[in-house]
């Protein structure tokens, strides 16, 4: 969805992005969503995650509290400020793209209390050679986070990306003052088809073997992403609606662009 077509109520705490709605970024990813799409900034709504790609702008809203000059960061969840409630996390990524035929990557969030989410966005910004792009996202998982949790954020690259920096911010709201769209949890809305046998959520709309082709073989990234307890065959034949279940036609695809 073009940012220009969204109002501040749609964007919630990310309403500051309206200032940049006429900036342009080339999109990569799912051809269904990129071909013929305007280069003006877009917002992707997928699995109740909001995400957008930006040029390398300088803005105080893009300064994360937790930051790493690598593809991994970790922090302990602090006490919630008085009269606030935790809505979720903003996750950001600075990157360049490499000379590759495919560009594929995951964001993985895990905590010591059992949260385990892996997300492969269908579309994201592809900067020109030598330039830097920013991917910014909001994950409404405040209800699943507990004070003292160790939160781990990883950017797992399949192919085509060089991670320069990743960051995270805690997103709070005043008690009782919240946008409805930001109350929706990632795990609401029928994502059971995207759950692995370990209980982790593999929020991806691409067949694993398409990703394997992108990385030229069975790569190490899969074990980094899911650990050693899941075999790649579990995600064989993965669809845009998750795990194949031909006998069940009642699933309604989640909201995307």
Image (cartoon, grey):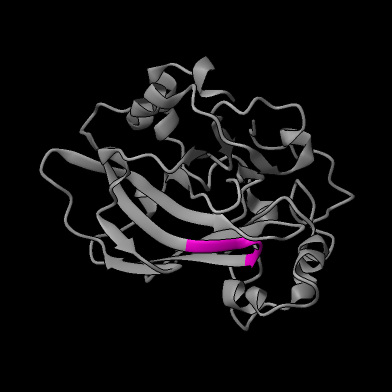
Q: 199 or 117, which lies in front?
A: 117
Q: Position of residue 220 (x, y in %)?
A: 66, 80
Q: How many marks?
A: 0
Q: Residue at x 72, y 50 (%)?
A: 205
Would residue 161 be counted in the magenta stretch?
yes
**Residue 19 lies in quadrant:** top left
Direction front: furthest residue: 130
Q: Is residue 158 above or below residue 137?
A: below
Q: Is residue 80 above or below residue 148?
A: above
Q: Residue at x 36, y 56 (%)?
A: 167
Residue 61 relative to residue 194: left or right? left
- Looking at the figure, which quarter contains the C terminus? top right
Q: Is residue 146 above or below residue 180?
A: below
Q: 68 or 143, which lies in front?
A: 68
Q: Position of residue 6 (x, y in %)?
A: 49, 18
Q: Residue at x 41, y 69 (%)?
A: 70
Instruction: Give the residues drawn in magenta, as a range.
Output: 158-163
Direction right: furthest residue: 246
- Looking at the figure, which quarter contains the N terminus? top right
Q: Position of residue 232 (x, y in %)?
A: 75, 74
């Amino acid at each position: 969805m073009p940012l220009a077509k969204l109002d501040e109520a749609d964007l919630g705490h990310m309403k500051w992005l309206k200032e940049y709605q006429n900036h342009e970024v080339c999109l990569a990813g799912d051809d269904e969503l990129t071909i013929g799409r305007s280069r003006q900034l877009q917002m992707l709504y997928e699995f109740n995650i909001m995400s957008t790609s930006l040029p390398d702008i300088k803005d105080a809203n893009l300064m994360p509290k937790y930051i790493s000059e690598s593809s991994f960061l970790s922090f302990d969840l602090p006490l919630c400020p008085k009269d606030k409630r935790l809505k979720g996390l903003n996750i950001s990524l600075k990157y360049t793209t490499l000379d590759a035929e495919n560009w594929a990557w995951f964001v993985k969030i895990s905590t010591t209390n059992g949260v385990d989410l892996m997300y492969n966005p269908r579309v994201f910004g592809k900067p020109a050679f030598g330039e830097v792009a920013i991917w910014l996202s909001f994950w409404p998982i405040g209800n699943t986070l507990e004070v003292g949790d160790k939160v781990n954020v990883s950017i797992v690259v399949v192919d085509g990306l060089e991670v320069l920096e990743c960051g995270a911010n805690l997103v709070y709201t005043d008690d009782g003052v919240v946008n409805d769209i930001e109350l929706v949890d990632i795990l609401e809305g029928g994502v059971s088809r995207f759950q692995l046998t370990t209980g982790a959520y593999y929020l991806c709309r691409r067949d694993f073997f398409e990703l394997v082709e992108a990385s030229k073989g069975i790569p190490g990234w899969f074990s980094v992403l899911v650990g050693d307890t899941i075999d790649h065959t579990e995600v064989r034949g993965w669809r845009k609606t998750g795990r194949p279940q031909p006998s069940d036609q009642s699933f309604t695809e989640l909201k995307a662009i």
